[in-house]
Image (spheres, rainbow, N blue to C red):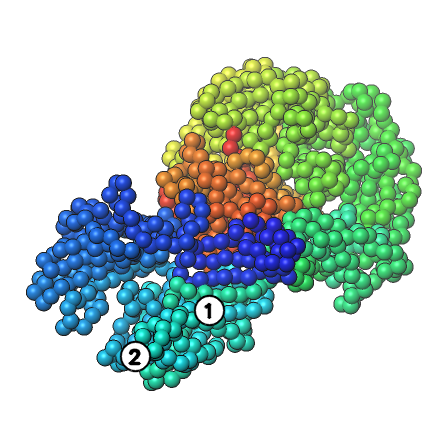
Amino acid sequence: MDEVAAATIARTTGKQVEVTGLRTETARVFANPSGTRTLEQYLLPVRARKDNAWVPVDTTLVRGTDGVVAPKATVVGVKLSGGGTGPLVTATLQGKEMSLSWPGVLPSPELSGDTATYAQVLPGVDLKVHVSAAGFAPELVIRDAQAAANPVLRGFRFETGERGAAAFTGDGQLTRREQPTEYPMSLGTSFDAKQYRHTLVNERAKDTPYWDDDHNRKALRTGYLNWDGTVGRWRSLFQMNTAQLIGTTVRKAYVTMTLDHSASCGPTPVELWQTREIDPAKKLTWNNSVPGHWVKQLWTGKGNANDAGGCGKSQPDLPMAFSSPALFDAVQGAADRGDETMSFGLRAQNELDKNQWKKFFPATAHLLVEYNTKPRVPTSLSTVPPTPCGTAEAPTALNTSTPGFSAVASDPDGSNVSGQLEILRAGAVLTTLNGATVGSGTAFSWPTLPAGVLPEDQPGTVFAYRSRLVDPSNTFGPYTETCYFTVDVVSPGSPTVSSTDFPDGAAVRWVGETGSVSFTAADSDTAGFAYGFSPEVPLRVAADHQGKATVPITLWPDQPGGTSGIPQRLYVRTVDRAGNMSSSAPEWEVNAKARAVSAKPVRGDTNGDRRADVTQVFDQGHGRTAVWNFLSRDGGFAGGYIGWDTGVNGGFPATTTRSARGDFNGDGRSDVAIFREDPGQKTGLYLLNSDGTQILAGSGPAWTGDTRYRLSTAHVVAGDFDGDGDDDIGVFQGYAGAQTKLWVHTSNKGQFAGPVQQWDSGAGKADVRDFSPVAGDFDGDGDDDIGVFRGYPDDQTKLWLHTSNKGQFAAPAQQWDSGLSMFDRDRARFLVGDVDGDAAGKDEVVAVYDNGDASAQMITFSSAGGSWTHKPWWSSGAERSFEMSRAVLTAGDFTGDGRADVAALYDTGDGQRALYTYASTGTAFGGKRVDWTGRIGDARPAVHVETTRKYRLVARHSDKCVEVPADKVKLQAVPLQQADCVATAKNQTFLVKRIGASPYYTVENAVSGMCVDIAGWSHQDKAAVQQFPCGNAGVPKANQQFRLEYVDGVGLDLVTELRAAHSGKCLDVSGYSQDNGGVLIQWRCGVVAKTNQSYYLRAEL
């Protein structure tokens, strides 16, 4: 049962209900009618998993049909020898295994309860093995002095065989358990799971640790003992797991345990203390624990229990509950500090009074805490429609006094929550809006702010909003960051228009010649201008600090050589910072002189002036996609402007579409084509045509069909494959079983034919996830070819070429091989252009290669005589100022000299980008030139997954797949590791499932159905990453929830971090391991994404 279901039943019935999905071998969590939770955390395991069900621990040994001896139900998997030469004991825990061997042939054991006795393993010596819930303890029982004299016993040590035995404590060294002169005498040791920690210290053995003394550790001993003829004081220490309580608000806290025996027949005191951490790896003795190890006394209580007969009648075992303000403060302090464990100690109040001697049952010791977990901070808080979160210094201007607001709820317990929204002025709350109760992961909105709360006549007054969530127990979570805003409902004045290139109505410039028009606003709060050749003014340009902007205009007739469609009416409106538009537009007509343009078109020329431009599709956030144009000119580039804009939730989200750029209608101007997966299992191809100034979307798709591309496993390229002057589109679609097909859509003046299959790799021959395709005329015959840089293991890359003959492609032929460990395809982005300007007009490929550490180089691949060569043309050098993840790259002849250059729209932070260009000299690329800086405001792309698809997590630093080891895939608590990616290895595949509308996901192994889990709810670095049974459907455990943080890339090359929701730390391949078997751990995330914390999220085909 999940937390939501348990909380609902508890609330409606008024009774406590267990959240069975959170049950472990030592803990249970209960939902209370009040909305709080209660943790019952035991010191030792009280239950174990058997046949996918929880059963009580039962250490009774039984003999299997194969003769092997094993307990009925324990946490540690223990198998004992049934006799013979095999290992005496084999123990497994969390995928780790150890064995213990006896140097000889073992007899068949006699079984009694939890003990197996192997008689006469040496003359006069029996071997006993005691099994506990969390380990085992071998013991040699020496019957007499003659047996004790056997030299074999001197320095005897059990030999261990280990595979990851770090899960266990114990070293095989025997210690004497009885007085040396008494027989039978025992020599023993113990092996226990590390996480269950309790031990003792004894004044009589001041330097003796008791971690491996299974005999004395059967009880928590405290007080002064001289009843059995020995004299000395005992103290006990134990440690509880409190990771579940981190960050919670504690309501009540108890430590409870059952008293087994007391020396006195009447109640005598015992003290509970908070101690320093205890660790089996550290020697803990009386001498080094008194007094500094004991931090604070928490409680003093009294009790007695004596069934030895000395009190006249048997006194039953006594359950004792310890509670006090000091204990409460200690538990809350641990929760606040993020302590994953708490250590306690028991000692007598008067350690010289033998009547205060006591023994407690360790298996009964548990921590009982009523707590509540605060709701998380709401995510995605914004206005409706969304606007940026403003700062106090730069508030966002809103164009309404009655805005709406929305957010996404998130609660780590999965509780239903409601949102509280506060509107503030100068820090004081003006009003509070309370939302409806919703489930965790639900997107919700508040009622529109009532009229009158915000004035409409104070545009200079700064207001603010913030939000928090509250759960059914009336516990509030933390606030979101405070967002500042102003209210401006007044439309700006109309702008003025001026131009010497396009005077109003006069034709000065030629058709196809780029000129400029300037806009000037009349208002001081101008953000920019909306303009275009229709009243809808679809284009956007930002204003400078003076309220001005200059935009490029290029006019083309409807038909080549004529003047139809010229002149054009230019509409311009001022847009202020609140988004208000001027109500009227000035009358302005742009005109051009007719001429025939005979110059050959240029690849990537958006406005048709025979010089390449930079055009890129950007994700603007909130489902809005925009095409930005940067038009080249003498000496650089004109300012950037938005040539096409979907608006918020416009239906073309950048993360789920694929685009290509080319001149698809043959008019000499580069267009944009976008593939989109449409309803009804169809795929649509949408064409955005350039008219020289605007980018115009058609009324519907240029092609739609039942051939459903899976765009998450497809590569799209564009080129004039048939040499008819219209660019065509090629799609490499991946299929299951390492099969890839090439489909080609041929264009005829912008009318696209259905896909024709041009190549099929065949099953098991080519995995599209290893492809980086490029298109260009590599042989100079006028038909664009397709090259594929294909990645292979061990950082090897090969270039395969599909040569086109009037649109018919030959089978791929290998052109180049990097060799092993010489070129990692995943580090490169590939551009195409005629960078050397050769007379044949052949295209080259430029690989922009990430060297790491903010360093990169550009390597040019050239075809000559049927073979390909490569050499570096540029390097960032020691400057270390080029981070590949910040750059959006383009190639084209921006200078008009016949040689293709490279441009990078480089993210400089805070939504700003700079346009850097690297001009070709024919043999190299020149240094960086800054051609434009400004705000694009592109959003950090959201990671999109399909919940029904399986994915691989491929570690970026090693190119290896995250997996659950195949031989342990059905076991719980198995650590995750990396290994070579194998196409048929289903244990390397995962289902990534979003939790409602929240930014959190679960990652579920496709074979086991278990979830990626941070062991023990740990918040610490180096915590194990394992697979563990998932929390029940709908509300997974917080330590099984991850944020997928975008790093870079798209589609098959999308890179993400996985941040644990409960700790905020990343899944990390420990030590940057390059080896198979390198384990995953939790580690604090890097300020900049680390490569060993970055993973390619690659969909299975």
Q: Which mark is residue 225?
A: 2
Q: Is residue 369 above or below residue 80?
A: below
Label 1: which secondary element? strand
Q: Position of residue 803 (x, y in %)?
A: 52, 19
Give the residue number, with chain letter if any, for mark 1: 256
> What amino acid does circle 1 point to?
Thr
Q: Is residue 907 above or below residue 124?
A: above
- Identify the residue at image location x=77%, y=52%: 446
Q: Position of residue 782 (x, y in %)?
A: 59, 18
Q: Nearer the viewer, residue 757 or 90?
A: 90
- Identify the residue at image location x=56%, y=69%: 252
Binning the other alpha carbons within 10 Å of mark 2 as few (below 14), some (14 to 19) or many (20 upward) gives: many
The image quarter in which residue 290 lies: bottom left
Q: Position of residue 1099 (x, y in %)?
A: 53, 35
**80 left or right of 838 in image:** left
Residue 932 visible within the image: no
- Whether pointer 2 and pointer 1 mark residues with C-beta atoms closer than 8 Å, the reply is no
Q: Nearer the viewer, residue 1081 or 105?
A: 105
Q: Is residue 616 above or below residue 800?
A: below
**179 left or right of 939 in image:** left
- Identify the residue at image location x=18%, y=60%: 140
**873 left or right of 143 in image:** right
Residue 615 visible within the image: yes
Q: Please give the count of numbered marks on the rendered protein.
A: 2
> What amino acid does circle 2 point to?
Leu
Q: Nearer the viewer, residue 632 or 678?
A: 678
Q: Which mark is residue 1037?
A: none
For marks 2 and 1 on the same chain, the one whose residue lies earlier in the sequence:
2
Label 2: which secondary element? strand
Label 2, label 1: how far apart the Cα atoms are: 23 Å
- Identify the residue at image location x=36%, y=59%: 194
Q: Position of residue 606 (x, y in %)?
A: 71, 31
